Amino acid sequence: MDDIVKSQFPEFLEVERKVQEHRLPDLRNVKGEVVMRLAPSPSGPLHLGHSRMAILNDEYVKRYGGELILRLEDTNPANVDPDAYTMIPEDLEWLGVNVTKIVPQTDRMDLYYNEARKLIEAGQIYVCLCPQEKFRKFKLESKACPDRDVPSEESMERFGKMIDGTYGQGEAVAVVKTDLKHPNPSIRDWIAFRISEAPHPRTADRFRVYPMMSFSVAVDDHYLGLTHVLRGKDQLTNTDKQKYIFDYNGWAVPEYYHYGMVNMPDVVLKTSIIKQGISRGEYTGWDDIRLGTIRALRKRGYSKDTFRRYWIESGLRESDAEFSWDIFNSMNKEIVDPGARRFFFVPDPVEVNISCKSGLKGSMLYHPSNPEMGRREYTLGRDPVVYVPSEDWGSQDNGSLIRLKDLAAVVKNGNYANCQETNLPPSKTKIIQWAPHDSGDFAVLKPDGSVDHGVAEPLIKEAKGVVQLERYGYVNIVDGSGTAYFLHR
RNA sequence: GCUCCGAUGGUGUAGUCCGGCCAAGCAUUUCGGCCUUUCGAGCCGACGACCCGGGUCCGAAUCCCGGUCGGAGCACCA
């Protein structure tokens, strides 16, 4: 029956398979090509969380064609790491995200100022001289600050004084008039510009008045010609704020999508915490494998395709979710396994003396499913000493039969063992890995900060990339130093 | 507290717009079994879900109302 279907209606099977595959929903209102953006702040390299917005946006630009703009939101000098300007594009490139244009916001300060002046003139932005506390109190009480009604010429002059340094940090802000009665206090008359005298890592002291995110985002989304914006639900109120700028200017609003928040367990993502840890020497760097940065995950051996598959499957849902390492790892395993050569690693090794009537030779496939990848072979002689995992060896009683994989079946007698010549059926026998006596020390660094010490078969010295240590798990080997990074089981 | 979102097994998703083909699919986890000189891969099987209460309807996971729970935002951060 299957054969008939296969031979006569192959297209039917095709269709069925496609239905199973996860596919992102179509974007609404697409007219020809799309223009989308990634808008991280350059405070550090990208992490697992960022990879979602990067890949989702990239997927849509790949589907419809168009532009993918990397907009570096660097308008808070206190929060900028100069290295991030190079690390972020590196991370994106590795992820296979095709950025067509890079735009740092500090290149566009004149544009923000000009747009501000336009709105000041129209009476839609005013400059408030209230102390911070007072401004906030007015807001919460839905009251107008006295500066709200000064003539626009006066506000314009004050804006000039913000820029020329007459006002110091904290003494003046430019505020967008919205609706003082708006139910959400954060949307009532929100701040568009503030003074920051902190030196900017990129522009030094060239500017002292910086736009707030909601202002620069609105201006940029318009002038950069964004058609669709994908962002997290945490941006929902910002979207409402930004709509005022669009309305005041009569600009068309891009299509906004807000996907749910994803909680990522067991991993450090917060840039400020990582930075602190690095400077204190607790972490070796941005790629410390205990971290959730893209470069750390990359170092552990994750494939870029895993990120893509995972986030496509997660889609654009608005409900919150829990990140699942189980699923992420399982996807990665599927991608990485076909190319992962197998090796024996013996953690916590114990020496066993084997007695044999004839010489022993170990011969193991590099990959059982792909025999064409060849074999690794070790000639051990007649009464060799081998290493075995103490945990496995110790769990077996004296007199029990144990199979040393692809080497011999032996009967345990303390730290000695006798070869068993008979060809007993292999099932039900404990099968363990082993390493010859001339094996080198090997250590696996794990993401929880622990290290598994042991020995690994000599040929592992030639290995690079992701390998499977049989019965132990997948690891990534980056050099011949006798260490590897733990990937997953 | 205020504002806004959301709710399908342990986890991630499909289905919800346009009610019946859903006694709910897929993936992952866990547990069994098969295969096998890996506790890997593969194959087979099992457990496991439509938040609750009302309403509309011949018929509701899907529509309406109320509740509950979860999350996000409420900065001179992004």
Image (spheres, coloured by chain):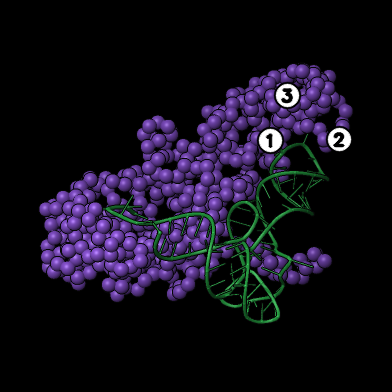
Q: Is residue A130 left or right of residue A385?
A: left
State which quarter of the image contains the N terminus of chain A. bottom right
Quickly name the residue at label 2. Answer: A425
Q: Position of residue A403 (x, y in %)?
A: 78, 29
Q: Position of residue B43 (x, y in %)?
A: 77, 53
The lab-note entry on whether marks 2 and 3 share a chain reads: yes
| Distance between mark 1 and mark 2 Cα atoms | 21 Å
**Do we see residue A193 in this rendering?**
no
Q: Earlier in the sequence, mark 2 or mark 3?
A: 3
Q: Position of residue B19 (x, y in %)?
A: 64, 76
Q: Which chain is purple?
A: A
Which residue corresponds to the image point at 71% horizontal and 22% vertical from the top-left? A386
- When asked about the image quadrant of residue A154, the answer is bottom left
What color was chain B assigned in the picture? green
Q: Earlier in the sequence, mark 1 or mark 3?
A: 3
Mark 2: which amino acid? Pro
Which residue corresponds to the image point at 83% horizontal and 37% vertical from the top-left? A427
Q: Earlier in the sequence, mark 1 or mark 2?
A: 2
State which quarter of the image contains the C terminus of chain A. top right
Q: Position of residue A167 (x, y in %)?
A: 14, 53
Mark 1: which amino acid? Arg
Q: Secondary structure at mark 1?
A: loop
Quickly name the residue at label 3. Answer: A394
Reply above or below: A100 against A251: above
Q: Secondary structure at mark 2?
A: loop
Mark 1, other Cα within 10 Å: few <14 / some 14–19 / many ≥20: some
Q: Are marks 1 and 2 in contact (CB under 8 Å)?
A: no
Quickly name the residue at label 1. Answer: A471
Reply above or below: A191 against A403: below
